[in-house]
Each structure stands twice: as C-alpha cells, then as structure tokens.
Amino acid sequence: MRLSGDWLTNPAAQSVCAALTAAGHQALFVGGCVRNGLLAMPVGDIDIATDAPPDRVCALTQAAGLKCIPTGIDHGTVTIIAGGRPHEVTTFRRDVETDGRHATVAFSTRIEEDAARRDFTMNALYARPDGTLVDPLGGLPDLHARHVRFVGNPDQRIREDYLRILRFFRFTAWYGDPALGMDADGLAACAAGISGLADLSRERVGAEMRKLLAAPDPAPAVASMAQAGILAALLPGTDHRALAPLIHLEQGEPIRWLRRMAALGGGDPTDALRLSRAEARDLARLREAMAGTGTPAMLGHDLGTALAFDALLLRAALLEQPLPQGARDEVARGSTTAFPITAADLPALSGPALGQELKRLKSLWLASDLRLSRSQLLS
C-alpha cells in the first residue's frame, strides 16, 4: 500500500528524509501524518522516525543546509527546519524505565521496538519517503475500522504515561467509529488507572481537554469518561448531560471548546485546566449568562455576538429546547446598539448623583430590551 499527498511529496519533508537516507539510514514518516493521510484528513505536524542517533541526524541535516534544533535530544528528538517548516525527527527508541509521566529511553535500530512503545495501534503506522506503508504491529485494520486500541497491554501503556487515559478518550472522539463505541479493554484499563491522573501536570490535562472538546462530537467519549469516574476525578461536580443537546444545537456553528466546557458545569476549572485569564473570564461570563434570564439583545449588548450566541445555545441545551426564534438577529441588534445616554445629557448632576441616575436610566433601557430612545429616557 502506498500513500500520497502534499504533506508527503513536499520538497521540504523530502529533503529531510534525503539527508538521512543518502547516508544509509532509515527515514520514515510516522504517527499523525500517516494516520490522517490514510484517513484523507488534514495533516498538521510532520514527524519522522529514523535509526540514526540524534547527533548524527543533526550532522547530516546541517550538512544538507538545514537547521537543526535539539528540542528533546535526551529523548532522541531534534527539530529540523526545512522550507520554513519544523519537522520533528526522533530516533527509534525503547523504554527502559517509566514513572507514569516521564520515560528513560534507549535508542534502537529496530522499528518494531519503536512501534511497541507507542500508544495506539493507529499511531504505530509508518511510511517510507516514497509513500510505501510500513505496519509493524498490524494497526492498519484498526485504523480502517476506526477502532482506537492500545498497543499491547493497555494497563502497561497507561502505567508508562497516565496522560494516555485522556488521549484514549480524545482519540476515540476524533477517530473512533461511534457505532463501535469505546474499546472495552482500554476503557477498563483507564478506569483502573484513575489514581495516576493526580500526578499529571495541569498544563497537560488542560491541553488534552481542549483537544477532546474540540472534536466534532465529543459527547459519547465524555459520557464514557463520566461513567468510568474519570471526569469527576479531573473536574469534580461536572455533569455531561447537557453536552449532547448542545452539540445537536451547534450544527453549522463554529466549534468552540470553551462553550462545551461551560456545558459541563461544576466548579471553576481555571486551575485544574490551567485556563488563561481570558478563558477564565469568558467561561465565567458564559456560565452567568446561561443561568440568567437576559434577552438575546441584552446578551448581545453585554457579551458581544459570539459569547452571547454561545450563552443562548447553552441555555437552550440545558432546557432541552430550541433556540428562540430570531435569536441571531436579536443578538446582532444588541451587539450593535449603544446605550443612548451619556453624562453630557445630565448637566444638572455630578458625582454620585450622576452615577446613580445613569445607572437608573440604563436599567430602564435594558428592561425595555434596548428599545427606549434617548428622548424617551430623558422624559
């Protein structure tokens, strides 16, 4: 079987491979680029595996006029800049020791050892520079079946890195067949490894949750996380039941993971997921708005178009009702309508009295659904 695609034939990627193969080394595309290429999905990062040790990779690529950055050289990874694009090149390796977060590795010359330490069978697929598929573990049938399955023993894979629990749900949401559901052995191993989640960095957990919730339909995977106790371990108090109705209402809308995070409720996830200040602010505003009674126009005025419409989607999902008729137009009206009174309209007032009157008038204006005019308010 032979792959094709711009990501494969790109002169920059081919130049990295050529620098290694010309010296007698193997160079194979691996992981996400091969998986997505086979699924006819967009390819992002380009990862290359080789039997050349990292210092040799740097020497050969630099001799070919490429830039080498030792991004993870202790673990066998260097980043080669070719055509202005980064290509991660990693030496074949095998795990010597793991602690659930970090691994001590030994370099290898055997692709079978490199494949055996990967997480899922669909990620243990390789392609030579000419596109010829190399499948050392027989992962291609799993990919065709959209079956997200751990390489080898799921418990062992998870003990090597407990983040693989979250990756299991994320990959199932993105690549799994909904009719197939979760791999039973993998799900059982994830449930058994819950205690290891506590040792993961919040940055890693946050990154995985962002990617999971950005999937086209993460609701089944999140429901499985909840049933296995994993969602509560990460985010106590969350409730996934509004997520599926939200995703149904979202059809045709841009996917926003933070909107979906708001649907889960629970406590403040800012620390648990390492949210940025902007993300934490928007999440708090969404939660307040979805629980409130403000009209679409009021929400548009207070939150702007995007957040206001998100709040309406969330409110409808919680109530399991359709969006109000004309909601989008009303949000747009509110977002473009300014409060028509300024301090200059009240020249007889100043200080606290001015502030109180402006507040009173704005309350009247909001109660009118932003329809009272300047003259009506002043009269």
Image: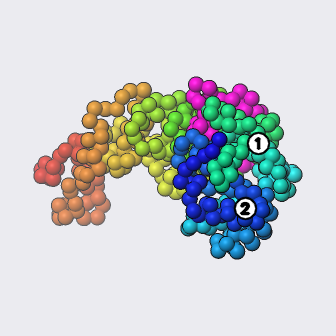
Q: Please indicate whether residue 350 sits to the left or right of residue 202 in the image.
A: left
Task: Report the front residue among 181 and 257.
Answer: 181
Q: Is residue 86 above or below residue 212?
A: below
User: Residue 236, position in %: x, y?
Assistant: 63, 38
Q: What kind of residue is marked 2?
A: Thr
- Let me know if residue 258 is in the magenta part: no
Label 1 SS: loop
Which residue occupies 36% across, 42% down? 309
- For label 2, the residue is 21
Using the image as rendered, state which of residue 338 and residue 320 is in the foreground.
320
Q: Which one is in front in this view, the residue at disc 2 or the one at disc 1? A: 2
Q: Pick whichever of labels 2 and 1 is earlier in the sequence.
A: 2
Residue at the disc numbered 1: 136
Q: Is residue 197 magenta?
A: yes
Res 204 visible: no
Which quarter of the figure has residue 13? bottom right
Q: Is residue 139 above or below residue 274?
A: above
Residue at x 46%, y 29% (from the top left corner):
245
Q: How many badges with numbers are in the image?
A: 2
Left or right position of 203 against 155: left
Residue 294 to residue 97: above or below: above
